[in-house]
Image (spheres, helix red, strand yellow):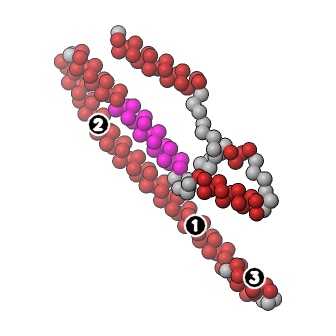
Amino acid sequence: MAIRKKQAIKQGNKEGAQIHAQDAIREKNQALNCLKMASRIDAVSSRLETAVRMNNLSTSMAGVVRGMSTGLQSMDVDKMAATMDKFESQFEDLDVRTQYMDDAMNSTTASTTPADQVDTLIQIVADENQLELGEAFNDVGPVGKKVPQPSVAEASKTTDDLEARLANLRS
């Protein structure tokens, strides 16, 4: 398309150049629409996957509740403790799966191209256009080089929660 536009312009064929330019713009818009549709399909797929996993977890939790009911009827403390442990384990699994699905939803439109290739291409484009890449390109998005670290407060809170649960189990 670019060659045809260039030839039409060189020949002074304004109408031909306009037609080729319109075709190029239309094809670009079609490609963008296809990309948007693919992104939406990925999002729907992820949501369906989440629903299936939540349904499986709900079934497991229903079994735990039945076990708790049986434990309460017999008042067997050991059985109740085992059931509660299983419930906590299921709940932790739910947290992990929810976090996984949230991450998946957030990255449905992310590129699967290796980060080093993306960085190289950005650098080439910047060099060709005499653009300077600022510090912002080092720490943003899937292309960035800096990895976010958990804060000290988050780590401390997690440790405190675990210690409280352990103390609660011992009592």
Please state the horizontal and vertical placement of residue 88, each as a whole percent of the image: 35, 27
If the image is split into quadrants, where does the C terminus sit?
Answer: top left
Instruction: Classify 153 as above or below 130.
Output: above
Q: Disc 3 versus disc 1: distance between alpha carbons?
A: 26 Å
Specify whether residue 60 is in view. yes
Horizontally, residue 124 falls left or right of residue 157, namely: right
SS assignment at label 1: helix
Q: Earlier in the sequence, mark 3 or mark 2?
A: 3
- Disc assigned to residue 6: 3
Q: Residues within 10 Å of mark 2 (few under 14, many from 20)?
A: some
SS assignment at label 2: helix
Q: Would you name the residue on which mark 2 appears?
A: 60
- Disc assigned to residue 33: 1
Please state the horizontal and vertical placement of residue 21, each as a whole percent of the image: 71, 79
Q: Which residues are magenta?
A: 90-107
- How many marks the image carries: the answer is 3
